[in-house]
Structure formats: structure tokens, C-alpha cells
Image (cartoon, rainbow, N blue to C red):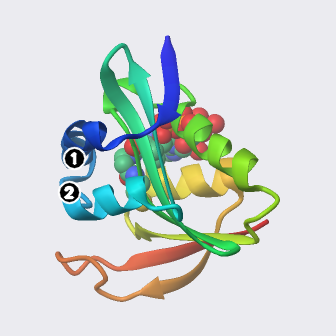
């Protein structure tokens, strides 16, 4: 059974391992610490036993939210875990958040489909050579 809870700083090591496994990149210990401990941060994890199999990190500025990262272990994908993680966030903040955005690699069809099909995010702009390997980013946005 998958359990969902707020992340703590004790989860950072596992979160970084999951990000590396799924994205070959990670937010880094200091940013994760800041987001987990800040009143304006939202980080939650999905656990199978003691193992973190999914996670989302989001920063909130008044009525605007930016998704920093979301990932689900590939052995646990397509089970609704990513949807559950983001639904929890939108349910909790639906009275407060007016818009939400994120950057995603233009070739990340899985994530683009996920954001568009499950949450009605739309592509609103492109950031050229946004990533270190020069891949462009789409900016996706959802108006609530
Ligand atoms: C994007 C991600 C978080 C989705 O998590 P998930 O738990 O598998 O998603 P859910 O099961 O809740 O939702 C599945 C939906 O995502 C999309 N999706 C997932 N895998 C897909 C694939 N291989 N091809 C196309 N669409 C896909 C579809 O819209 C799918 O809905 P459907 O099953 O009705 O077609 C996950 O694929 C992931 O961790 N990817 C790697 C990390 C990443 O790219 N993160 C985004 C960084 S911006």
C-alpha cells in the first residue's frame, strides 16, 4: 500500500536518489532543505513501506505556485501516484492558488502528457537552451 505524507529533512537523501534515478539531476540538498522547511514550500512523498517511490516539490508565492519537481520511480509509474501527489496539493491550496506553472524538457512527452491530460496545464512559452545540455524547456501553466 502506498502512503502519502509531508516530507521531512530526513527524507532528503532518498529524494535525491529518486531524482537522480528518474531525471539524472537533482534539486540539491540546500534547495530541498529550504523548500521542506519554508512556510512557502510544499514537499510531499509517496512511500511503499520505508521507501520513497514518489515525490513532489512546490514553491508558493502568495497566489502563485511553481512546481519544482515531481517524480515517481519507474517501477511504480502509471499507478496514479503522480496524480495523487499533485491532487493533494491542489486540494489543499485550491482557495489560495490562482495559477501554477513549471518548466519541462520539450522532449519529455510523459511529463507533458501527465500535466496536460491529468491537470489541464497548457504550454504557454518556450525557454531556449534552458537545461545544461542545451535542451529547450516548455513553460506550462494552469489557471485555477
Ligand atoms: C510524470 C510522472 C511524474 C507521472 O507519474 P505517474 O505516477 O506515472 O502518473 P499517473 O499514473 O498519476 O498518471 C499517468 C498519466 O501520465 C501520462 N503518462 C505517464 N506515462 C506516460 C507515457 N509513457 N507516455 C505518455 N503519457 C504518459 C499520461 O497522461 C497518463 O495518463 P493515462 O494513464 O490516463 O494515459 C512520471 O512519469 C515520472 O516520474 N517521470 C520521470 C520524472 C519526470 O519527468 N518528472 C517531470 C519533471 S518536469
According to the image, label 2 marks what residue? 29
Of residue 85 and residue 6, the one placed in the foreground of this image is 6
Pointer 1: residues within 10 angstroms few (<14), some, or many (20+)? Answer: some
First of labels 2, 1 by sequence position? 1
Could you say where residue 91 lies in the image, as x and y percent from the top left? 74, 46
Instruction: Write the residue at 71% across / 47% down.
Output: 92
Could you say where residue 101 lies in the image, as x and y percent from the top left? 58, 71
Taking the image as shown, residue 123 lies to the left or right of residue 9, namely right
Of residue 23 and residue 84, the one placed in the foreground of this image is 84
According to the image, label 1 marks what residue? 16
Could you say where residue 16 lies in the image, as x and y percent from the top left? 22, 46
Q: Contact, CB < 8 Å: mark 2 with mark 1?
A: yes
Q: Can residue 81 be seen in this view?
A: yes
Of residue 135 and residue 100, the one placed in the foreground of this image is 100
Pointer 2: residues within 10 angstroms few (<14), some, or many (20+)? Answer: few
Taking the image as shown, residue 101 lies to the left or right of residue 29, namely right
Q: Is residue 28 visible?
A: no
Give SS at disc 2. helix
Disc 2 to disc 1, C-alpha distance:
8 Å
Which quadrant does the C terminus fall into?
A: bottom right
Taking the image as shown, residue 15 lies to the left or right of residue 91, namely left
Give the vertical position of 81 relative to 42 (above or below).
above
Give SS at disc 1. helix
Amino acid at each position: 500500500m502506498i502512503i502519502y505524507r509531508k516530507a521531512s529533512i530526513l527524507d532528503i537523501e532518498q529524494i535525491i536518489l529518486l531524482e537522480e534515478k528518474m531525471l539524472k539531476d537533482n534539486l540539491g540538498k540546500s534547495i530541498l532543505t529550504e523548500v521542506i522547511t519554508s512556510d512557502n514550500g510544499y514537499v510531499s512523498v509517496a512511500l511503499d513501506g520505508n521507501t520513497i517511490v514518489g515525490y513532489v516539490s512546490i514553491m508558493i508565492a502568495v497566489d502563485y505556485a511553481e512546481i519544482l519537481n515531481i517524480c515517481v520511480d519507474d517501477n511504480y509509474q502509471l499507478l496514479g501516484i503522480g496524480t495523487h501527489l499533485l491532487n493533494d496539493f491542489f486540494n489543499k491550496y485550491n482557495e489560495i492558488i490562482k495559477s501554477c506553472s513549471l518548466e519541462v524538457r520539450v522532449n519529455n512527452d510523459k511529463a507533458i502528457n501527465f500535466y496536460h491530460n491529468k491537470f489541464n496545464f497548457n504550454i504557454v512559452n518556450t525557454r531556449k537552451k534552458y537545461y545544461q545540455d542545451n535542451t529547450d524547456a516548455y513553460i506550462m501553466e494552469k489557471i485555477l
